[in-house]
Amino acid sequence: MSGIETNFSEAKIQQLAVAEIRNKFPETYGCLYHVPNGGLRDKRTASILKGQGVVPGIPDLHFIWEGKIYLIEVKDHDGPISSEQKLIHAQHKVHGLDTYVFRTSEQIIYFVTYIIQGKSLHGFNRFISPYSVAENVELYREELSALKIKRLQQRKAA
């Protein structure tokens, strides 16, 4: 892999990163995993999954290593952070966890490699979500509530 992945979807970026990491570090199997919270589903399946604990906005990848968990949000070149994701990033920060936002598979691979090798993550601070701010939980909760009301009104009008 080389160069910036400007035309890859989030799914492709994630697939490339996970495949490379699993090949390079087989000991990460079960420690680096995807949480499938998105995708189209029928209403019945969506209801069942919601009841089972599916929460919109949960970061795409979780990496557990040496007693710590790292949260990774995968975005394509210009993919925005959703209102649901803003709230989740802030909520996780309340509990001391940062969410890292990566836009290329290389960034994800370097991040996981640094963690495995015990290197400082200081250089990755620029990838911490700007929404990983505990004090903004209520602000993002209100933003999401307003968005849900707007969506409901649009559905009623259609």
Image (cartoon, helix red, strand yellow):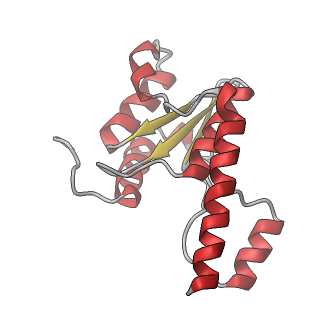
Percent coordinates x, y for residue 146 in the rendering? 65, 56
Q: Position of residue 149 (x, y in %)?
A: 67, 65
Residue extending furthest left? 3
Name the one closer to the observer, 92 or 65: 92
| Left or right side of 29 for 148 | right
115 versus 71 height, above or below: above
In depth, the one of 103 and 24 nearer the eye is 103
Q: Is residue 134 left or right of residue 86?
A: right
Q: Residue at x 50, y 23 (%)?
A: 115
User: In x, y percent, where is residue 134?
Assistant: 68, 27
**How many labels sit on residues?**
0
Q: Is residue 33 visible?
A: no
What is the quadrant of the C terminus in the image?
Answer: bottom right
On the image, the x and y values in percent for residue 7 come to 22, 57
The answer to which quarter of the image holds residue 151 is: bottom right
Write the residue at 73% across / 27% down. 94
Q: Which residue is drawn at 58% across and 30% down?
A: 132
Residue under the image location 57 percent in, 76 percent down: 154
On screen, residue 123 above or below 17 = above
Q: In this view, does 104 lie to the left or right of 135?
A: left
Quadrant of the drawing holding the N terminus: top left
Q: Is residue 75 visible?
A: yes
Q: Which of 18 and 58 is in front in this view?
A: 58
Quick check: 95 above or below 52? above
